[in-house]
Image (cartoon, grey):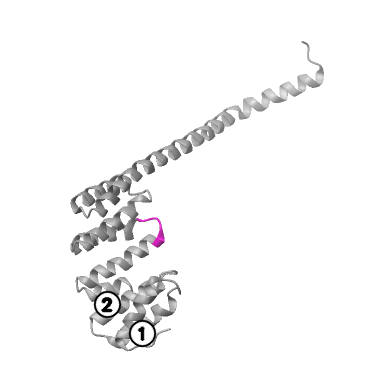
């Protein structure tokens, strides 16, 4: 089919454009397609890793309920080493630390809590680990270290827990007035329906402090 003059001009313009920008467009298209493929592959990898981590976390929960420290240690180790970047990694470390603590192995309890503080993506989990680690330090009579861990302003949402734990550390040092002040702060910050509130009130009552 013959082209009229206008069509020939359009075709010539298109050929000139393609000759000038064709390689760039093909390269850009290739990059976009590779990026899409890489994103999908990464999503598939994450889903697969989360599924595998979920299985190990279930095993860890069963071992924790049975108070089988050896199986807890094995499952938690696998979870942290192989799937530490998933949400199950920090949760598993917190659970393992609780089992060690309840078994009286304070040294073992410290390591997973420190790992959560250093590696968890979720700030709430990091702060929870910090409060629990301070509790382990309390039982180890490392009071100054525990207070140093909770120094400064408490993070939002953890004001009551921080003040309560600081009170525990201070009372262990015989600093009754400072402890009473921390417990009062903890009671003020604790939610009305929080179970911790009743515990704080009992501590305050034992010190002869006023509560709310």
Helix, strand, or loop for circle 1? helix
| Residue 173 percent across, percent down from the top left | 23, 82
Q: Which residue is mark 1?
A: 181
71 relative to 175, above or below? above
Q: Is residue 186 left or right of residue 18?
A: left
Instruction: Verify whether residue 115 appears in magenta.
Output: no
Please report the bounds of the magenta region as a residue range: 120-124
Q: Quadrant of residue 134?
A: bottom left
Identified at 40% across, 79% down, the residue is 187
**Residue 190: % across, % down:** 42, 74
Q: Which mark, by number, is residue 53?
A: none
Residue placed under numbered mark 2 in the picture: 169
Toward the viewer: 57 or 17?
57
At x 26%, y 82%, the residue is 171
Q: Which residue in the rendered view is the most extreme toward the front? A: 66
Image quadrant in which the C terminus is located: bottom left
The residue positioned 63% from the left and 25% from the top of the image is: 19
Q: Nearer the viewer, residue 145 or 173?
A: 173
Q: Quadrant of the N terminus?
A: top right
Q: Is residue 122 magenta?
A: yes
Where residue 8 sits in the image (x, y, percent)?
A: 76, 19
Q: Position of residue 33 (x, y in %)?
A: 52, 32
Quarter holding residue 133: bottom left
In the image, residue 23 sits, relative to residue 82, either above or below, namely above
Quadrant location of residue 114? bottom left
Q: Depth check: 212 or 88 in front?
A: 212
Cα separation between marks 1 and 2: 13 Å
Contact flag, marks 1 and 2 (Cβ < 8 Å): no
Main SS type for the magenta part?
loop
Q: Residues within 10 Å of mark 2 (few under 14, many from 20)?
A: many
């Amino acid at each position: 089919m013959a082209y009229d003059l206008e069509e020939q001009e359009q075709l010539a313009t298109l050929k000139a454009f393609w000759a000038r920008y064709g390689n760039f467009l093909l390269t850009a298209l290739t990059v976009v397609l590779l990026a899409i493929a890489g994103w999908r592959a990464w999503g598939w990898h994450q889903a697969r890793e989360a599924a595998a981590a979920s299985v190990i976390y279930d095993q860890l929960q069963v071992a924790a309920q049975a108070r089988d420290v050896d199986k807890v240690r094995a499952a938690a180790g696998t979870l942290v080493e192989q799937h530490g970047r998933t949400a199950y990694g920090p949760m598993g470390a917190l659970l393992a630390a609780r089992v060690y603590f309840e078994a009286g192995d304070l040294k073992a309890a410290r390591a997973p809590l420190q790992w959560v503080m250093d590696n968890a993506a979720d700030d709430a989990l990091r702060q929870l680990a910090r409060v629990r680690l301070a509790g382990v330090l309390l039982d180890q009579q490392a009071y100054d270290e525990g207070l140093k861990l909770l120094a400064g302003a408490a993070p939002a949402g953890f004001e009551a827990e921080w003040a309560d734990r600081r009170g525990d550390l201070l009372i262990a040092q015989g600093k009754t007035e400072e402890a009473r002040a921390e417990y009062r702060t903890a009671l003020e910050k604790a939610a009305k329906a929080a179970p911790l509130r009743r515990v704080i009130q009992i501590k305050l009552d034992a010190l002869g402090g006023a509560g709310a």
